[in-house]
Amino acid sequence: MTEQPAIPAQHPVSVGKWHLHRRLYNWVLHWALTPYSGWALFLLSFAESSFFPVPPDVLLAPLTLGNRKKWWKFALLCSVASVVGGVLGYLIGVFLWDLIGAWVFAHLGWAGINEPNFAKFQNWYDRFDFWIVFTCGFTPLPYKVCTISAGVARISFMGFVIASTISRSARFFLVAGLFWRFGPTIKPFIDKYFNWLCLAFMVLLIGGFVVIKLVS
């Protein structure tokens, strides 16, 4: 899984220490410039499914730009790792949540894993279990909260895997496909308007919760 970009990837933009979200983004992005980029993409996709806050799209994009002929391989790697990580999150919810739930709420609230979010997901699973997983897998809604809470709610494991596989694959193949099609013109746009994109992400995140609440 070691990949070296065929064309130079853009170096992370230097920012002040107070831009914590941007510094974390830069740390993820720098792996695209190393010989371990493939492993980093796999591990990032895996970790993001249960606790890590930065989506794997951040690394998937520059890797696709670096070797556009392999865009589908990067998308497949990202999809497989994310689904496997989601299964881990599900199993954590089933077997370990009673032991670690209080600690997780106390220390990982910054990643979206908190009691209010869990309460919302628990209520939604009673009526829309497959579609909740599918929506979280494809949209900016917190997939990590979905995977663990799905295990806590003990929804159908097979349904969870199918919904995760379809939604995560659709998302990552779409992202990689767009970067393959439109090339390096997108990357400078992301760097220039990163803060605005973060704001848009939060609007979509909140809007997604509102929409699901209205239909539930």
Image (cartoon, rainbow, N blue to C red):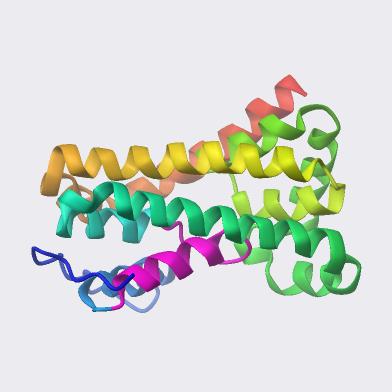
Q: Quadrant of the N terminus?
A: bottom left
In the rendered image, the residue lying farthest to the top is 215
Q: Bounds of the magenta span?
A: 36-56
Residue 139: in sight, yes or no?
A: no
Q: Which residue is located at x 60 percent, y 61 percent?
A: 85
Residue 147 in percent (x, y) is at 69, 52
Residue 155 against residue 149 in the figure, above or below: above
Residue 51: in sight, yes or no?
A: yes
Is residue 78 left or right of 51 when viewed as pictured?
A: left
Nearest the viewer among 42 and 216 is 42
Residue 72 in percent (x, y) is at 30, 47
Q: Which residue is located at x 84 percent, y 59 percent?
A: 94
Q: Which residue is located at x 72 percent, y 22 percent?
A: 214
Residue 105 in percent (x, y) is at 77, 67
Residue 180 in percent (x, y) is at 19, 43
Q: Quadrant of the C terminus?
A: top right
Nearest the viewer among 133 and 20 is 133
Is residue 91 left or right of 28 when viewed as pictured?
A: right
